[in-house]
Amino acid sequence: MRTQVVIIGGGPAGLLLGQLLHRQGIDSVLLERHSREYVLARIRAGVLESGLVDLLREAGAGERMQREGLKHAGIYLANSNRGFRIDFERLCGGSVMVYGQTELTLDLYQARDAMDAAMLHQVDQVQIHAADTEHPAVSFVRDGHEQRIECDFIAGCDGFHGVSRKTIPASLLREFERVYPFGWLGVLSQTPPVSDELIYASHERGFALCSMRSPGLSRYYLQVALEDKVEQWSDEAFWNELRQRIPHAAAESIVTGAAIEKSIAPLRSFVAEPMRWGRLFLCGDAAHIVPPTGAKGLNLAASDVYYLWRALRQYYHDGDEQGIEDYSATALSRVWKAERFSWMMTKLLHRFPQQSPFDLRMQQAELEYLESSVAAQTSLAENYLGLPY
Ligand code: RFL
Ligand code: PHB
């Protein structure tokens, strides 16, 4: 079997890249370790920058998002019972789209089905061969049979635990990491959101976030200890804790209900450099992880996809390899800025185990500065909306 680009990973990065390439007449085969049902059961991101919104439209998968997505022109930041709004529209003239990663992934799957492009689920033992030559290949086992695909390029869109990054020789790869001493407990509930915009709440009991998926579906998060287990958190305990961490007015009006999903995710910052080895490109979570406080993970996957799509288009349409040569440096420059923003938001809003009284005053001063300064708010808005590609 032969194709132009093998895409490893059927998450948003792999699906979006495949769709964009197809519309430029570039063939791909997509390999996914899990079943489609498994991939679509994962509840993850919810906030899309306008760059990703545009790419989804370009990929021919933006119609439902256009209809059902919620345009948000601001967020609330709360500090105990005090709250203030960051007005994106007024500060920077932009907005984000609230639309679940699960829905976006479903739309991309349906778009790929519609064009009948090759997509193999439940593949095992994926291995990358000769990525540092002009004749790379990928082998895997499916239904007990080993198969091999020869190709021009390999896109490693297989997330943080995938094989792509691990294929790059350790002597050529540098990894940068910070692991945070807490996690996020997330709950999805079929209740109307407490607020028309997201609330990011700093509180002495820990951080809380009120988000949403649709007018009838809410998504809430609590900062929890790393050792906490989901089973320890009954629905009642979750709502009680959330009410204590958000401003009183929100706590009093919140509608609670049964959790339809509950999970704990650890928080980490991670970057691998470079993002290319010969004809293998890392894309999305395969190359970098951000803590979710800045809502940047999915959006960074999208900007990587954009740069890689542009590079491959240049290669196939114009015979120009410059985009391929530049891919890693171009993508990393945007990645590090989003890492900085996500780290800054995490540091600003969470309680850390070893925080000194001085550290607490610094957080307090930072939040008060943000509340009073248009310059500080503009910087936050510019980054939250997404830096240009
Ligand atoms: P994914 O989604 O992990 O997809 C990778 C796919 O590769 C498959 N795979 C393999 N396939 C074949 N062979 C192998 N050996 C394979 N190994 C792995 C996996 O099964 C999977 O299907 O990576 P991708 O495509 O790079 O997308 C990244 C995003 O999913 C991620 O960055 C975001 O979800 C992060 N994130 C958020 N990002 C935002 O932009 N805005 C948000 O509001 C936001 N909120 C979040 C988040 C992530 C969270 N969690 C749980 C980590 C909230 C949370 C709670
Ligand atoms: C979400 O809705 O899942 C979400 C929103 C904003 C974030 C993180 C997660 O910063």
Image (cartoon, rainbow, N blue to C red):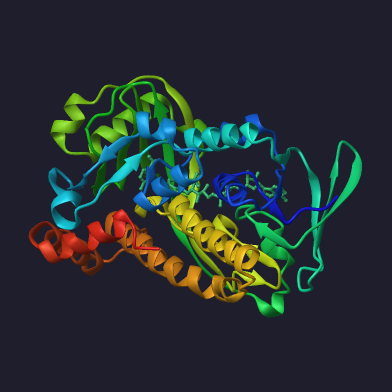
In the rendered structure, the answer to whether residue 344 lies left or right of residue 316 reads left
Decide which of 200, 380 is in the foreground and name it: 380
Residue name at image x 10 percent, y 62 percent: 374
Q: Is residue 355 above or below residue 36?
A: below
Q: State the residue lying farthest toward the left.
A: 372
**How many labels, in total?**
0
Decide which of 226, 33 is in the foreground and name it: 33
Decide which of 290, 13 is in the foreground and name it: 13
Q: State the residue lying farthest toward the front.
A: 318
Residue 282: image location, x then y, percent? 62, 62
Residue 327: image location, x then y, percent? 55, 70
Q: Is residue 351 visible?
A: no
Residue 219: image location, x then y, percent? 37, 33
Q: Is residue 308 visible?
A: yes
Residue 118: image location, x then y, percent? 73, 41
- Ligand 2 is in which quadrant of the figure? top left
Which quadrant of the structure image shows residue 238?
top left
- Quadrant location, the C terminus: bottom left
Residue name at image x 48 percent, y 40 percent: 44
Residue name at image x 15 percent, y 64 percent: 365
Q: State the residue lying farthest toward the right.
A: 145
In the rendered structure, the answer to whether residue 65 lies left or right of residue 79 reads right
In the rendered structure, the answer to whether residue 292 lies left or right of residue 15 reads left
In the rendered structure, the answer to whether residue 143 lies left or right of residue 226 reads right
Decide which of 71, 368 is in the foreground and name it: 71
Residue name at image x 45 percent, y 59 percent: 180
Q: Is residue 106 above or below residue 150?
A: above
